[in-house]
Image: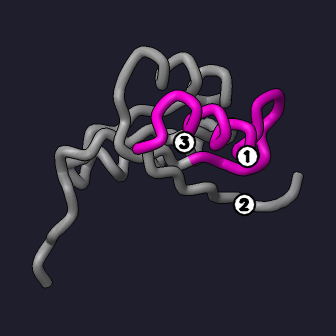
Amino acid sequence: MKDTGRKDAKILVVDDDVELADTLTDYLSEQGYSATKAYSGNEALNLLRERDFHLVVTDLVMPEVDGMDLLKFIKEIDRKVSVVVITGGTG
C-alpha cells in the first residue's frame, strides 16, 4: 500500500490524559510527523499562538477549555488548521 500522508505535517495533540497524549504524540513522531503535545486547552492555545500547526487532535472533555471551546479559538487564530475532536467518554 502506498503511503500518501504528509510527513511534513505539524500536529498538536491536546488531552488532559497525560498517558494518552504522550502515547499518541510518540506514535505520530514514530510515523515521521512533527508532533507536539499539550495537556490542557490553555497550554494548546499558547502553543497555537506561538507556532503553526496543520492539524490539532483534541480531547472533547477537558477542564477549563474543552475541545469545543478550543475548536472555536483555533478557528479564530487560524481558519486553515484542521481539527479532529476525540473523546474517551463523558466524564
What residue does disc 2 label?
88
Secondary structure found at label 2: loop
In 3D space, how far apart are the residues under numbered discs 1 and 2 (Cα atoms)?
Answer: 15 Å
| Residue type, label 3 | Ala
Residue that protrudes farthest toward the right in the picture: 91
- The location of residue 64, given as percent across then percent down, is 82, 28
Q: Which mark is residue 21?
A: 3
Which amino acid type is shown beneath numbered disc 2? Gly
Q: Are marks 1 and 2 in contact (CB under 8 Å)?
A: no
Three-letter amino acid code at the position of disc 1:
Met
Mark in front: 1 vs 2:
1
Q: Secondary structure at mark 1?
A: helix
At 86% from the left and 58% from the top, the residue drawn is 90
Please say if 65 is above or below 66.
above
Closer to the chain start, of discs 2 and 3, is 3
Marked residue nearer the N-terminal end (1 or 3): 3
Q: Position of residue 31 (x, y in %)?
A: 24, 54
Q: Residue at x 33, y 50 (%)?
A: 28
* Disc 2 crowd, CA 10 A, few/some/many (<14, 14-19, 20+): few
Label 1 sits on residue: 68
Q: Is residue 87 above or below residue 29?
A: below
SS at mark 3 in the image:
helix
